[in-house]
Amino acid sequence: MTDRLMMRVALWLALVTILGGATASAQFQMPDPKEMSGIPRPVTDLPDRTVSVRVIRGDLSRNIANQEVQLTIDGKPRTVKTDENGRAEFSGLPSGTVKAATTVDGERLESQEFPAPERGGIRLMLVATDKEKEAQAARDAAAPAVTGNVILGGETRIVIEPDDDSVRVFYLLDIQNTARTKVNPETPFQFDAPTGAGGVTLMEGSSPLASVTGPRVRVNGPFPSGTTFVQIGYVLPLKNGTLELTQPFPAALDHLGVIVKKVGDAKLSSPLIERQQDMPAGGDVYIAAAGGGVPVGKPVTLTVSGLPHHSSAPRNIAIAVAVLVIVAGVWFGRAPAQGSPAAERKELIARRERLFHDLVRLETDRRRGKGDASRYRARREELVSALEHVYGVLDTSHGPDPGRPGLAA
């Protein structure tokens, strides 16, 4: 696993621990067996040089017995039928490259190629399509949408990552439709990011049903049965070392889950949080917190205090002086204006959006383990410095930006 994936797993385990057994069980979702089909898994509970192949239909509860499975070792096939548990076991294998295969109702299922185990054994599954279930899902998908409700399921998370003079906030929304057919909520699924939020962005991996216009996030119905995943990111200015976050959502929240990157003496508090603990992950420390359900219409309120904060006054003074020098030079030189204030303002806003999207893309690549880690910090500092300059110029020479309420305050 990558360091980023290991960090996410560690944080997930922390949330499972503090949520408690019953809640964690309700939140845990088994992966689709189809995604695990054909992937070899080394184990120590089998004799040396043994491969066990399990054949199922659709899910783990539907074993296929008396099914012929062929194991090919360097081009030489062996065939064994599955037992009542759906398992075919091949023992005493010679060294070589191995591949398992079977055909269920005309569907050819094959494993990845892998070396025959010298020590211990290999377990793998071959997963046939549940055609009855697939047909039912197709009928449900074709049925007209009905009026119904969606909820924010147990995978929903609020992630907070403080920076020098700002805080990055991410909403990972696990929108659940528990009905078998598509549903349209009685009221539109939409909400506004908190006042002062800048660069509200729909992140990669989100459902195509979602869109962002200014500070407003909207997910258009009808919602398909199952999960609709939406990821939103934005930046809030940090003025005094304390973040006050209030966010209402248009659907009931099954369980509250919050992850805060711990910087300085950061502390998380909220009347909605029942349990929290510090959790090291990826070389950093995170606060993993959980609470119960939140009904629709009741805002989620979070306070993160004790954050390091640097006064922006010196920066603003320096920028103001620089702007005055430039203006004076233009004035005394009697040079013609290079463009209208409106055009300059438009260019600054466009540059700000480009820089912020570059920053969001850089952070997203880092979380996914992409890019050159050694260049990450330098590039990030370059983008943040450029953003600070653009914000400063907008603040001092153009007044507040109506497209980003409160951002220039």
Image (cartoon, rainbow, N blue to C red):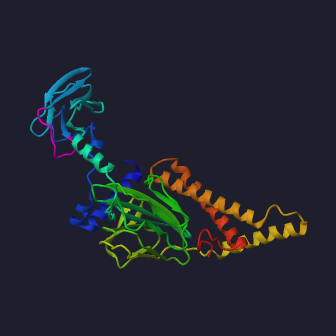
Is residue 403 part of the magenta span, yes or no?
no
Q: Residue at x 40, y 51 (%)?
A: 3
Quarter assignment of residue 222:
bottom left
Q: Residue at x 23, y 24 (%)?
A: 72
- Choose between 309 and 200: the one closer to the eye: 200
Reply above or below: 376 against 275.
above
x, y percent for residue 99: 26, 29
x, y percent for residue 149: 33, 65
Report the residue that reaches farthest toward the front.
Answer: 144
Q: Main secondary structure of the magenta part?
A: loop
Looking at the image, can residue 318 be seen? no
Considering the image in quadrants, where does the C terminus appear?
A: bottom right
Quarter assignment of residue 269:
bottom left
Quarter assignment of residue 175:
bottom left
x, y percent for residue 266: 44, 73
- Choose between 275 and 67: the one closer to the eye: 67
Looking at the image, can residue 307 be seen? yes
Reply above or below: 58 against 167.
above
The image shows a total of numbered marks equal to 0
- Choose between 1 and 340: the one closer to the eye: 340
- Residue 363 falls left or right of residue 69: right
- Choose between 257 and 382: the one closer to the eye: 257
- Residue 52 falls left or right of residue 376: left
Report the residue that reaches farthest toward the left.
Answer: 84
Span of residues in magenta: 57-66
